[in-house]
Amino acid sequence: MATLSPFLSKTPLSNTPTISFSSSISTPLKWKSITSFSPSGSSSSRSRRRIFIVQSKIREIFMPALSSTMTEGKIVSWIKSEGDVLSKGESVVVVESDKADMDVETFYDGILAAIVVPEGESAPVGAAIGILAETEAEVAQAKAKAASAGAAAPASHPVTSTPVPAVSPPEPKKVAESAPSGPRKTVATPYAKKLLKQHKVDINSVVGTGPFGRITPEDVEKAAGIAPSKSVAPSAAPAALPKPAPAAAPAAPLLPGSTVVPFTTMQAAVSKNMIESLSVPTFRVGYPIITDALDALYEKVKPKGVTMTALLAKAAAMALVQHPVVNASCKDGKSFTYNANINIAVAVAINGGLITPVLQDADKLDLYLLSQKWKELVEKARSKQLQPHEYNSGTFTLSNLGMFGVDRFDAILPPGQGAIMAVGASKPTVVADADGFFGVKSKMLVNVTADHRIIYGADLAAFLQTFSKIVENPESLTL
Amino acid sequence: MHCSAAFSQAATSATAVPTISGSRHVGALHSSSSSSSCTLLIPSKPINLRFCGLRREAFGFSPSAFTRCSNSQRVRLPSRRRFKGSNVSASLGDNGIPKSFDYDLIIIGAGVGGHGAALHAVEKGLKTAIIEGDVVGGTCVNRGCVPSKALLAVSGRMRELQSEHHMKALGLQVHAAGYDRQGVADHANNLATKIRNNLTNSMKALGVDILTGVGTILGPQKVKFGTDNIVTAKDIIIATGSVPFVPKGIEVDGKTVITSDHALKLEFVPDWIAIVGSGYIGLEFSDVYTALGSEVTFIEALDQLMPGFDPEIGKLAQRVLINPRKIDYHTGVFATKITPAKDGKPVTIELIDAKTKEPKDTLEVDAALIATGRAPFTNGLGLENINVVTQRGFVPVDERMRVIDANGNLVPHLYCIGDANGKMMLAHAASAQGISVVEQVTGRDHVLNHLSIPAACFTHPEISMVGLTEPQAREKAEKEGFEVSVVKTSFKANTKALAENEGEGLAKLIYRPDNGEILGVHIFGLHAADLIHEASNAIALGTRIQDIKFAVHAHPTLSEVLDELFKAAKVNF
């Protein structure tokens, strides 16, 4: 019944000069008839405050547009009453817009023959709110015109007013009363009600899809034929978060309480790349690597600012030198593109996004320079100051989730590259050596995803073998 | 329906027992007759001269400054001698025998009011204890002004970031502002904790004893706290504050039907919430909820929203804070029955017409916030032991906050400040009342001018006011036969406001053109809550427009809005 209450409460509200948008929910019905009556309303409103149109000697007073954003105004008070003689420039009516109250003055001499919109009621910009007659003789004619137009306000004219369907409250009231007795009453949210009014949509024509069958702003926009894209911004962006409590609705397209958060630019870029990656035929090869030696080296060089990332990138780069095809890419599906440089991109999670700063010429730089470079890149990435060449020039990507304890995973090949290496955690594992002796060694699983158009299984296997040798005998990394 | 009360200080409830030091026995000579108009003390405590010297004028209102209690006799002790050395003083009991007390002053309730009183009491050299049955900080710090400001800080930013128009006008591009509910809730909670600790530490550092437990008055100058600890004090201040008022018929479950206590925890953000009451509390929460994506329905018993505000300000505020937002409202209706959501049904609210009492409507919403005002918390205070009967729960007091008993007599040495007396339910009013009481018990008569106390509503933009509204001023003028003038200025004329692209706003000055007295100032606009103090101070100090108009304001600042008002006012001098 919430929806229909405005109709019920309309009578008391219209008596008071307080502003009330709810009272004017009934206006869609009303204004249809009025605007049809005054086809030239739009042209006349161009003159903003002076808003008369010459139509024989009976003129209509239109609701003026008092501000650029005003769509409708409310009559605060009629300064003149019916029958008053007006002279040009006199204030006739006080109109309240979305911004302020303003006196509206007449542009012509004449007699205020009829008040179409009484005090307290609202009318859209351009609608007739009163009728001005030039002479006494025309007053009756003007009144008749007001009445026949179907715009006569019920109370303000004793003489000519006939029960006008649009304005008279009984009709909507009837709906209001019958609705609750039916199986379902119509409930619309506050914003939905505003939109109903704004788009002049009849509430009965809208099917509510919200919780408990209520009409939501989206329902109204759909009914009004407005693209949903527009509605996403205001309604979904400030989304409500998980509701612990009861209000869970039985069924809805979007789970109640779920949150729609649009992608950031970075997330949108990731999404685009991921879809693109589907067009590349990839395959994966895994390889176990013993890391005790690497770990020992890491302990040694750590105080000098060397990070594990730098070590792995260096190792990968050195392996790539020997297997240039893994560092190649397939641009057009017809050829190999061998890259002159070995640029190792390393995936980094940053502020809910993912970025791949690139260690350029990782094979040429020594470990310490590489570490230092890496530190700079991460800092830049955090402060969003990476230059494009610092994140899109990679020829091979490294993705390490080992620090989370992930033992193996499978990476998606970024477009434009030939291969990506997914590095798992190094874990103590029982291994048997060539002589059949058991021992506990730290073992790490790496998994490379590659573009099979240019890199074949044997290429990747050979590359991984080289990589594992480098990692298992890491002294060369420091050279 | 009581709509416009704002948050104030503490409530007491139960537990624990600390030690009380009885080392410093203090007393004072006091006149034996309780009927004397004020407690006359021979000032025997070290008096803080700096305080008196600098701030004296702040409390001595010029005679023409209107006060609510204009017939009160202000007694100023003509001379004030300073005693150096010990803190020891003696008091004569009714039988003439010196009586010693555990404390000079005991304050029941460690909210903002109690805290303000305690700090001032220490400054004046009183041995002071404060009894708290719940948590230090009271309503304001824990369940009121403080956490709500944290939520409003978030809502203000959200609103700004979501306003495409506003951002574009500034040349900014923001993509999809979002928020994390728990993060917002944590911010509010952390702020409350921080302020509570600050308050506690400030009192501890000054040597105020914090006694934990519910305080009960056993008799004159005697208080019990916790289960069986009894302490005595020369003077006692009741500062037990208030709790949210829930009209009968409304079932609060703390989840879908909530009060401000629950709402401030922000445990969930409903899609659609009904707010019962459109005073300060309701208005602030509507600002928070709409910024976080909820739709709001106001239910107001009076015919207009925002009944406590100057009508002109209220009208503009409605245009900015209500109409363009996802808010609708029902005015002139009572919510007679509110049932929380359960068994897959939404919250239902039954409305009746406030005048005819006829059923009007039934609303179905996701949640309902009851913001119908606050009820004094005076249960278990032991008022019956001293023959005091509350009026609608409030402790009756005179203009000096002295408690009045059932026979209309003053209860000696007993004062009540803050929400518990209901004079002005604002945290800072409680504090000011507390300071006023301390002034009195240290031998300096003082009557607080409540018309100089500003109030603010922290919506975006903010609303603030001090003194009379225009209708109140006109009524008073008619009665007393003087003229009233009003000047207004728009924030649109202020450079700083325009630089911020926040030109929406109005400031209004109501004054007497015959003598330049400021009767009231009302501001709606950017940082209104901070701007009001120039006006409230002027009222408190009795500064006239013809003087303050020559004060210089930095350019460009929002303070020029007031400068504009003072300069626009026409004083016939």
Image (tube, helix red, strand yellow):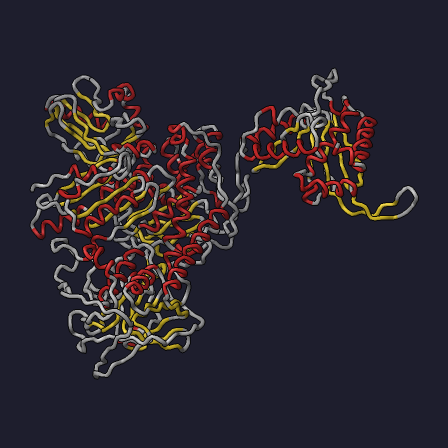
Residue at the right extreme, as displayed: A435
Q: Residue B27, located in which quarter of the rendered image?
A: bottom left
Mark yes or no: residue B1 visible: no
Q: Residue at x 31, y 34 (%)?
A: A27
Residue B471: percent from the left, percent from the top? 17, 47
Residue A421: percent from the left, percent from the top? 73, 32
Indicate the quadrant containing the N terminus of chain B: top left, top right, bottom left or bottom right: bottom left
Residue at the front extreme, as displayed: B85
Q: Residue at x 92, y 43 (%)?
A: A435
Task: Please tell me which residue lies in front, B365 or A14.
Answer: B365
Task: Please tell me which residue lies in front, B43 or B468.
Answer: B43
Left or right: residue A365 compared with residue A232: right
Q: Residue B401, located in which quarter of the rendered image?
A: bottom left
Mark yes or no: residue B523 visible: yes
Q: Residue at x 42, y 47 (%)?
A: B151
Residue B360: percent from the left, percent from the top? 33, 50
Task: Please tell me which residue lies in front, A29 or B428.
Answer: B428
Relative to residue A449, is residue B547 depicted above or below?
A: below
